Image: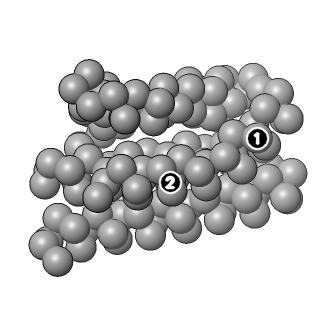
Amino acid sequence: MTTAEANSASIFADAWRMHEGAIGRMAAGDVRDAAEKAWCATLRATEALILARTGEGPRSSTVAGRRLRAAAQTEPSLGELRDRYLVRQAILHGECFYHDYYDPVEIEQLVSETRDYIRDAERLSR
């Protein structure tokens, strides 16, 4: 296993921990914190994917998004993941966490579906 692969696996493990935290915060009724933890899980999974595929981790969510968009232009299999990343960034991070504007049902669904995002990012990182 290369260093990038080992580091990627560690980052994916962190994404799973963040997702578990999001589920716990949602169950406790803390929608905004659940949304931010789900966003962090999404970001960490994306960082791990990029590191695994390129050997270089992004330094910020902006760079992660930019690299994912660029990769999706040449690899159509990444297009859906890119779209899901952008939706999560806008809704979980932007609208819900920063602006306290949200639909609890929508947030609960996005928090739950973060599990699928992480799984897909892991699959696409190989």
Residue 112: percent from left, percent from top:
72, 50
Q: Quadrant of the N terminus?
A: bottom left
Q: Which mark is residue 109?
A: 1
Amino acid type at image mark 2 = Ile
Vertically, is 95 above or below 104?
above
Residue 60: percent from left, percent from top:
30, 39
> Rounded to the nearest whole Å, what is the CA distance between mark 2 and mark 1?
15 Å
The residue drawn where x is 53% and y is 32% is 84
- Around disc 2, counting alpha carbons within 10 Å, would you say few (fewer than 14), some (14 to 19), or many (20 or more)? many
Q: Earlier in the sequence, mark 2 or mark 1?
A: 1
Q: Quadrant of the C terminus?
A: bottom left
The residue drawn where x is 40% and y is 58% is 122
Vertically, is 31 above or below 75?
below
Q: Residue 87 appears in which quarter of the rendering?
A: top right
Question: As drawn, which residue projects farthest toward the bottom?
Answer: 1
What residue does disc 2 label?
Answer: 118
Judge from the rendering whether residue 100 lies leftward or rightward of residue 121; answer left or right.
right
The residue drawn where x is 42% and y is 50% is 121
Q: Secondary structure at mark 2?
A: helix
The residue drawn where x is 40% and y is 28% is 79
Q: Nearer the viewer, residue 110 or 25?
A: 110
Judge from the rendering whether residue 22 lies leftward or rightward of residue 83; answer left or right.
right
- Around disc 1, counting alpha carbons within 10 Å, would you say few (fewer than 14), some (14 to 19), or many (20 or more)? few
Q: Nearer the viewer, residue 71 or 46?
A: 71
Q: Secondary structure at mark 1?
A: helix
Residue 96 visible in the picture = yes
Q: Which mark is residue 125?
A: none
Judge from the rendering whether residue 90 lies leftward or rightward of residue 3; answer left or right.
right
Judge from the rendering whether residue 55 lies leftward or rightward of residue 99; answer left or right.
left
